Amino acid sequence: MEKAMTREAWSTTLVELAESRPEIVVLSADLMKATLASRFSDRFPDRSFNVGVAEQDLVGVAAGLALTGKIPVVATFAVFLLMRACEQVRTDVCYPKLNVKLIGTAGGFSFGLGGVTHATTEDLSIARTLPNMTVLAPADYAETCQAMRAAIDHPGPVYLRVGRSAEPVIYHSGCPFQIGRANVLRPGEDVSLLACGSMVFEALQAADILAGQGLTARVVDMHTLKPLDTSAVLSAAAESRAILTIEEHTVIGGLGSAVAETLAEAGVSVRFKRLGMADAFATEGNADYLRQVYGLHGEGIAREALALLEAT
């Protein structure tokens, strides 16, 4: 199985873009190497800024640079970016709608060995609540490259969640990407599996398992959580018997909540369940171990989908 790191994707793509975009600058808070922002700083040292372990200052400096016409790209662990510096992201970046791009690395279980202080399963919820923020959670290397390109071209604040460890490659030949438009990777009429980030691959695995039992599963890559592709959600509800959302994230406020809000406001009745972290902190372990613990793997998703269908 071919794998690649999404944190390599964003940094490699940014270096390519920066060759012809002198307004792009990169900032980090003593994590240039860990986030692979060092790919950029090695190539463009005069356009790279390391503020030290001071995440609030990191975001404030980025806001100031944006006001001068730069496109600041801020890279640090997601937990530090959207929790330690949440006020600055909200007030200094989102309120004036500045053109700052926020790269939250080590998202989900990808740095589970670091424990709850360094891994995060709440970042998408936080980012979704912030006015003017666009929220992206691409599925693999190729989609992260496309998401990085789209983020640079998109006016205003963007939060891009990437992992730390290598993840399976999904898009082998071409990767269509448009902010706010989901990708339907597989058709199906029995159940719709709506997933984001690393869970897209697991959803595809679950669809294969369900196919072995004579069931068809639609798999939708919901790479944009805000603005959500509501038409993709409503189509899934109209064309399948049940919807299961899957995310490496708390079920409170993330993809599952966004889908539930869409269905409720549209007055759509469909069997529905959110699969992700419960209202709890994750235990410590690598990504594969944690996915087994919390049922966020192909077999676990297939079991949940079967139970959902049996209840219809």
Image (cartoon, rainbow, N blue to C red):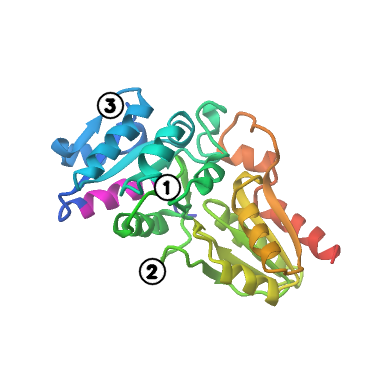
Label 1 sits on what residue type?
Answer: Tyr
The residue mark sitting in front, 2 or 1, is 1
Disc with the residue nearer the chain's start (2 vs 1): 1
Residue plotted at (17% across, 39% down): 47
Residue 39 visible in the current orientation: yes
Spot occupied by residue 122 in the image (x, y as percentages of width and height): 57, 39
Spot occupied by residue 85 in the image (x, y as percentages of width and height): 43, 31
Q: On the image, numbered disc 3 is attached to which residue? A: 51
Extreme residue toward the front, this view: 96
Q: On the image, numbered disc 2 is attached to which residue? A: 174
* Secondary structure under the numbered disc 3 in the rendered image: loop
Q: Residues within 10 Å of mark 2 (few under 14, many from 20)?
A: few
Disc with the residue nearer the chain's start (3 vs 1): 3
Q: On the image, numbered disc 1 is attached to which residue? A: 159
Secondary structure mostly seen in magenta is helix
The segment highlighted magenta reads 5-17
| In contact (CB < 8 Å): disc 2 and disc 3 | no
Asked which quadrant contains residue 222, the reply is bottom right
* Secondary structure under the numbered disc 2 in the rendered image: loop
Residue plotted at (15% across, 50% down): 22
Is 55 placed above or below 234 here? Answer: above
| Residue in the foreground of this view, choosing between 237 and 308 | 237
Q: Is residue 46 left or right of residue 221?
A: left
Label 3 sits on what residue type?
Answer: Val
Residue plotted at (50% across, 29% down): 118
Q: Residues within 10 Å of mark 1 (few under 14, many from 20)?
A: many
**What quarter of the picture does the C terminus occupy?**
bottom right
